[in-house]
Image (spheres, rainbow, N blue to C red):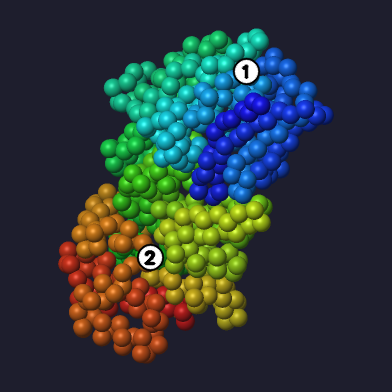
């Protein structure tokens, strides 16, 4: 009895698991069965695999074929396992030696002619393969840039199933006609000293680091049997990569796969672009330093959206762990090629018509990431927050407390990270003219009540700060502070937090060690908070959040503990339910 075996990796949310694929040929009517909880897309792989193997010139076995995806208790979805299923079947036929590929990861979607198509989620797959001791992987050539992000594992690229068979030492009755790439393993790291010449057909000016990474792809593609097609494909990939690199703000030079990071932070928007609004800028500085959620409140046209879009420019750059987390999420979402790996925190701004599924994550079978996960380690901005549906807003309550979201579906429960800074913006009323004496406001009291009714008390109680953004005059001639100088103070305050708590997680995540903070807060400061709780102006959660804000203000001012003035400022920034 000959059983073909191959290794693949599946994903449930961002949680990978090893999939062992075994194929058994037995006497019986010609058929192929796929068992092990495949979804509809994976079940369709039977036809893709059959067509791809036939395209190799291999005679399809006229017998009963059973393909088992182990572990059978976990659902498998998508077309990630197409190539591994084909290799397992070829092992059962005798084209490939099953012993040579038992420790080789094979992933990729198959086209009917045997070419390999890119997959989503390759980055978390390769990171997991590295942890599980799989030292060799074969991936689609279209995923080459993403594969380079992981070191410590030898990654080979292939453009066709025929090339995969060749890499595994198999023999084919005839050479496949589809273009193939070189079998040389991908480099596991980049160096800025690498050749920096861009591909001939690249029309985008690339930075030297981007050109260095693209040069290898162009060189290896040029060695293919169809040189013109390969160079054109490489040039297109490199041009897009160079464009992504130019957009990235490389605030931390010592990073994973430096060639995918930009180096010019000045390309991003700057706080100096906003005229006036010094109080609002000060409040956003507090938000960035202590990871405090905030509501921007003011009439239209005063700069609420401008301030929000510049919040990431004053936030500290992502560290290596955070960059990998963000890149893994984007890989699963299929957007990593567009964004690249960048130290700039993510910024998500969903439209006010967003559904609950798009906000939290949704889908049948296994849920896909939503806006709260895409904003992980960054900013989730809700412009015109009262226009969002009440259900979409209420979805935010649990992630704001736990920094994750749990999505249960029929096939599996997916847990996605959701550690984001929530920033909302709102007008004073539906018409927007209810600021100040509101002489021009045309809204009734009922309209105002309905407008702000979607911002429920429990949601506002999780908001640390309400920031007023009043009208400004163009005649103001003050010199505006740049994002770089504000960011320097924010980084210094974050550093002071790490000195206090020992790790950055306890310094910035919602589940703060409040007992530790209260034990090191003066009695005068605690008395102010206790008095506000007794009067009913603060809830217990609100008092804890005000204390956190007070500590952030103190650290920004260079003190290692808050004074009563810091507590008073923090309490003044609490959302006022009678206003919104």
Residue drawn where x is 36% and y is 86% of the image: 533
- Tell me if residue 63 comes above or below residue 336 in the rendering: above
Looking at this view, is 537 or 51 the one in front? 51
> Does the image show residue 139?
no
Q: Position of residue 497 (x, y in %)?
A: 24, 61
Callout 2: few (<14), some (14-19), or many (20+) C-alpha neighbours within 10 Å? many
Res 150 → quadrant: top left
User: Disc 1 marks which residue?
Assistant: 95
Is disc 2 placed on a helix, strand or loop? Answer: loop
- 3D distance between C-alphas at marks 2 and 1: 55 Å
Relative side of 178 to 140, left or right: right
Is disc 1 placed on a helix, strand or loop? Answer: loop
Relative side of 423 to 440, left or right: left
- Tell me if residue 430 comes above or below residue 337 in the rendering: below
> Does the image show residue 25?
yes
Q: Position of residue 226 (x, y in %)?
A: 57, 11
Q: Position of residue 529 (x, y in %)?
A: 30, 82
Callout 1: few (<14), some (14-19), or many (20+) C-alpha neighbours within 10 Å? many
| Disc marking residue 190 | none
Residue drawn where x is 60% and y is 67% of the image: 391
Res 136 → quadrant: top left
Looking at this view, is 81 or 213 the one in front? 81
Q: Residue furthest bottom?
A: 535
Residue drawn where x is 35% and y is 20% of the image: 196
Relative side of 501 to 364, left or right: left
Q: Which mark is first along the chain, 1 or 2?
A: 1
| Disc marking residue 510 | 2
Residue drawn where x is 40% and y is 53% of the image: 377
């Amino acid at each position: 009895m000959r059983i073909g075996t191959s290794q693949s990796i599946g994903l449930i949310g961002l949680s990978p698991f090893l999939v062992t694929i075994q194929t058994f040929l037995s006497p019986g009517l010609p058929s192929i069965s796929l068992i092990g909880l495949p979804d509809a897309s994976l079940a369709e792989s039977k036809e893709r695999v059959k067509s791809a193997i036939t395209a190799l010139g291999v005679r399809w076995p006229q017998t009963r074929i059973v393909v088992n995806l182990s572990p059978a208790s976990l659902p498998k979805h998508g077309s990630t396992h197409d190539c591994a299923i084909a290799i397992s079947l070829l092992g059962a036929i005798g084209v490939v030696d099953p012993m040579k590929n038992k420790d080789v990861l094979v992933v990729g979607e198959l086209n009917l002619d045997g070419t390999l198509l890119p997959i989503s989620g390759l980055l978390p797959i390769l990171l997991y393969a590295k942890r599980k001791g799989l030292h060799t992987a074969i991936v689609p050539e279209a995923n080459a840039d993403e594969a380079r992000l992981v070191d410590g594992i030898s990654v080979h690229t292939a453009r066709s199933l025929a090339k995969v068979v060749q890499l595994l030492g198999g023999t084919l009755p005839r050479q496949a006609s589809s273009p193939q790439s070189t079998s040389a393993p991908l480099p596991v790291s980049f160096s800025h000293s690498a050749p920096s010449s861009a591909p001939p057909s690249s029309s985008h000016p690339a930075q030297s680091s981007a050109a260095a990474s693209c040069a290898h792809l162009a060189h290896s593609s040029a060695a293919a049997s169809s040189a013109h097609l390969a160079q054109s494909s490489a040039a297109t990939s490199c041009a897009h990569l160079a464009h992504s690199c130019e957009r990235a703000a490389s605030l931390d030079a010592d990073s994973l796969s430096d060639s995918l990071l930009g180096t010019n932070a000045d390309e991003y928007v700057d706080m100096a672009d906003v005229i006036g609004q010094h109080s609002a800028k000060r409040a956003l500085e507090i938000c960035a330093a202590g990871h405090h959620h905030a509501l921007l409140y003011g009439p239209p046209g005063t700069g609420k959206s401008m301030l929000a879009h510049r919040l990431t420019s004053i936030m500290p750059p992502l560290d290596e762990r955070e960059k990998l987390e963000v890149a893994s999420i984007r890989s699963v979402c299929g957007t990593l090629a567009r964004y690249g790996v960048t130290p700039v925190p993510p910024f998500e701004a969903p439209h006010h018509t967003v559904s609950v599924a798009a906000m939290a994550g949704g889908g049948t079978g296994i849920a896909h990431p939503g806006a709260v996960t895409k904003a992980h380690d960054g900013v989730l901005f809700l412009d015109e927050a009262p226009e969002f549906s009440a259900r979409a807003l209420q979805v935010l309550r649990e992630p704001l407390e736990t920094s994750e979201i749990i999505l249960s579906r029929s096939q599996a429960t997916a847990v996605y990270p959701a550690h984001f800074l929530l920033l909302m913006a709102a007008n004073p009323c539906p018409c927007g003219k209810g600021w100040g004496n509101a002489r021009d406001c045309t809204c009734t009291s009922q309209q105002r009540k309905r407008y702000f009714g979607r911002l429920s008390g429990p949601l506002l109680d999780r908001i640390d700060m309400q920031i007023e953004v009043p009208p400004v005059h163009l005649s103001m001639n003050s010199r505006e502070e740049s994002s770089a100088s504000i960011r320097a103070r924010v980084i210094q305050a974050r550093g002071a937090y790490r000195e206090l708590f020992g790790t950055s997680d306890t310094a910035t995540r919602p589940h703060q060690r409040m007992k530790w903070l209260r034990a090191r807060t003066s009695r005068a400061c605690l008395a102010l908070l206790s008095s506000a709780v007794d009067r009913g102006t603060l809830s217990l959660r609100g008092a804890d959040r005000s204390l956190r804000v007070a500590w952030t203000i103190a650290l920004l001012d260079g003190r290692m503990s808050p004074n009563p003035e810091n507590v008073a400022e923090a309490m003044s920034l609490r959302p006022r339910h009678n206003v919104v």
